[in-house]
């Protein structure tokens, strides 16, 4: 179970505290078990500082705490604070990346399901960057026409392999499997089973996808259709 430790303190020396945290990260490289650290200050009290440190488990957190570098830097942290920092141990019971969920729906429910549902996920000025197209597609209807072109050429499914979310971006690594049952890019149906891998990065605005960047092996796909010699 993911574990989060919340450390609260009072300090007017936030810049020094940040430098101390940088030192700890450098000194514990290859040994620390922490996966995510977030430092924030209270808007109503700038001296009230909170650090949230995420670990894969409570046991990992304890191993991290027992590092000599952690102990040394904690003593220096105490010197920067007004009083002893307080610790709260938290077991995470729900961790939901909302944008990741929307990206999953984009692929599984919309692209490989009902493309009209894209109207619920995309902004009106959605922009699609695909190096295989001579120009960006702008707007939901333009992208729906692109999806329809693929759907007319193939009966396909999509499997999501990995997703990484940071800020307003979600990147998804996917595998596409399809049978060529219709005309595609001037190629008459071959009935061939094809597979293709790729990645897509979505940018979100107010909970909706406003931009996408695609990278995938269309050259390899055309080779599988017998159009190109590979």
Image (cartoon, helix red, strand yellow):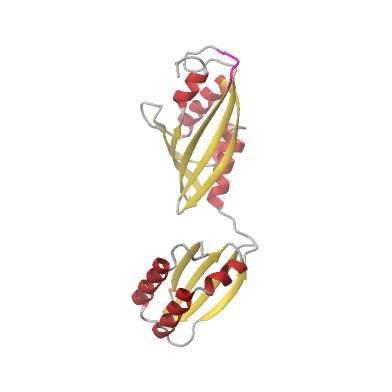
Q: Is residue 190 magenta?
A: yes
In the image, what residue occupies the spot 59% across and 17% down? 192
State whether residue 45 appears in this view.
no
Residue 57 in percent (x, y) is at 61, 64
Q: Is residue 144 magenta?
A: no
Name the one closer to the observer, 200 or 145: 200
Residue 53 in percent (x, y) is at 51, 68
Tell me the quadrant of the picture where the N terminus can be found.
Answer: bottom right
Residue 148 in percent (x, y) is at 53, 25
Query: Which region is colored magenta?
Result: 189-193
Prevailing SS of the magenta stretch: loop
Residue farthest top in this picture: 188
Tell me the quadrant of the picture where the C terminus can be found.
Answer: top left
Determine whether 45 is above or below 111 in the image: below
In the image, what residue occupies the spot 53% across and 49% down? 99
Determine whether 72 is above or below 102 in the image: below
Determine whether 175 is above or below 53 in the image: above
In the image, what residue occupies the spot 50% across and 73% down? 67
Side (left or right) of 165 relative to 101: left
Name the one closer to the observer, 143 or 51: 51
């Amino acid at each position: 179970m993911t574990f989060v430790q919340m450390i609260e303190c009072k300090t007017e020396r936030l810049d020094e505290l940040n430098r101390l945290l940088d030192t700890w990260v450098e000194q514990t490289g290859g040994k620390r078990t922490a996966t995510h650290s977030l430092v924030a200050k209270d808007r109503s009290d700038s001296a009230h500082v909170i650090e949230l440190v995420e670990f894969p488990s409570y046991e990992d957190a304890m191993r991290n705490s027992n590092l000599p570098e952690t102990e040394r830097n904690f003593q220096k942290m105490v010197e920067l604070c007004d009083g002893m920092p307080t610790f709260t141990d938290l077991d995470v019971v729900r961790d939901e990346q909302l944008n990741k969920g929307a990206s999953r729906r984009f692929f599984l429910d919309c692209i490989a399901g009902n493309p009209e549902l894209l109207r619920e996920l995309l902004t009106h000025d959605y922009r699609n960057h695909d190096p295989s197209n001579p120009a960006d597609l702008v707007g939901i209807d333009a992208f729906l026409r692109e999806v329809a072109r693929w759907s007319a050429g193939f009966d396909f499914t999509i499997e999501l392999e990995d997703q990484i979310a940071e800020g307003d971006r979600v990147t998804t690594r996917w595998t596409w499997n399809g049978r060529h049952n219709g005309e595609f890019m001037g190629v008459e149906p071959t009935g061939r089973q094809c597979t293709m891998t790729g990645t897509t990065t979505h940018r979100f605005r107010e909970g909706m996808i406003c931009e996408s960047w695609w990278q995938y092996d269309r050259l390899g796909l055309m080779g599988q259709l017998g159009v190109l010699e590979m």
